[in-house]
Amino acid sequence: MNPTTKLSVNINKVALIRNSRGENLPDIIQVAKDCQRFGADGITVHPRPDERHIRIRDVYELRPVVHTEFNIEGYPTTAFIDLVTEVKPEQCTLVPDPPGVLTSNTGWDTVKYQSFLREVIQEIHAAGIRVSIFLNPEPDKVEAARKAGADRIELFTGPYAKAYAAAANGPQNFELFNAYKETARRALQVGLELNAGHDLNLQNLKFFKLHIPELKEVSIGHALICDALYYGLENTIQMYKRLLS
């Protein structure tokens, strides 16, 4: 029997809707409470320097109400590290996004940036926080992630989602998917746990979980919030959780 994978709901898109009107509707804090009440195993936020969705103030206000698992994603600037070590989420996910990027679109080159990542991870570990590194399906980058001190890798599933959408009955780009499986296998071999995220949805999630059952957690935001417009937030969270059980 495959182990159950936890679902962390990324609420950035909810904040984006709120910010479009300049008021507090929808209420981010209430949404986080409701997501957990509806079955989410965690809440993810990705505060960016321009605060176009989640704001720094939101991160501080969310900490007391997230009783499942709080995951803060971001590029490790000095300001970001200071925020994370002060708020103390259960997990920090490091992404290599430059400040102006629209959304995360690649993983770390853990070989090139190993020394940088090691220093950052040591500082975050000192605050008692688990660290996950955003990684492309590149098996040769796994060992460097371990040497940098990461606890987990988060498989960047954007390319997988595109391949799945382009095929009729599951991904036909087997070379790509084999790279995901090999990256996962190597991570487990060296003692790293597995997360996944980006463009996972109700159509492609089951296949990914079926073939990489060791996933500890998936972080899903954009697709889940879009689905909630049709199915309702509570029902949508349960639909995703069923695919992960």
Image: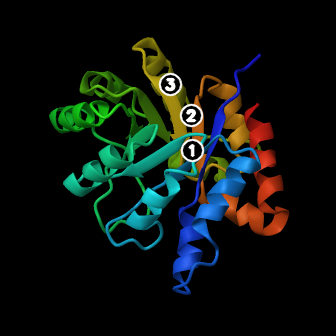
Residue highlighted by disc 3: 184
Residue 27, quarter of the rendered image = bottom right
Q: Is residue 81 above or below residue 6?
A: below
Q: Which element is circle 3 on?
A: helix
Report the mark closest to the observer, 3 or 2: 3
Q: Earlier in the sequence, mark 3 or mark 1?
A: 1
Residues at marks 3 and 2, CA–CA distance in whole angstroms = 11 Å
Q: Quadrant of the N terminus?
A: top right
Picture residue at 63% right of the left edge, 49% below the top: 200
The residue under label 3 is which amino acid type?
Answer: Ala
Q: Nearer the viewer, residue 57 or 77?
A: 57
- 3 and 2 marks in contact (CB < 8 Å): no
Q: Position of residue 29 (x, y in %)?
A: 59, 62
**Residue 177, numbered label:** 2
The residue under label 2 is which amino acid type?
Answer: Phe
Q: Position of residue 41 (x, y in %)?
A: 65, 40
Query: Is residue 202 visible from the viewing direction of this image?
Result: no
Q: Position of residue 17 (x, y in %)?
A: 59, 76
Residue highlighted by disc 1: 160
Picture residue at 76% right of the left edge, 63% below the top: 228
Determine whether, in the image, residue 118 is placed left or right of residue 238.
left
The residue under label 1 is which amino acid type?
Answer: Tyr
Q: Residues within 10 Å of mark 1 (few under 14, many from 20)?
A: many
Q: Which element is circle 2 on?
A: helix
Q: Quadrant of the C terminus?
A: top right
Query: Is residue 62 visible from the viewing direction of this image?
Result: yes
Picture residue at 66% right of the left edge, 62% below the top: 31
Residues at marks 2 and 1, CA–CA distance in whole angstroms = 7 Å
Report the mark closest to the observer, 3 or 1: 3
- 2 and 1 marks in contact (CB < 8 Å): yes
Q: Residue furthest bottom?
A: 21
Q: Residue furthest top?
A: 189
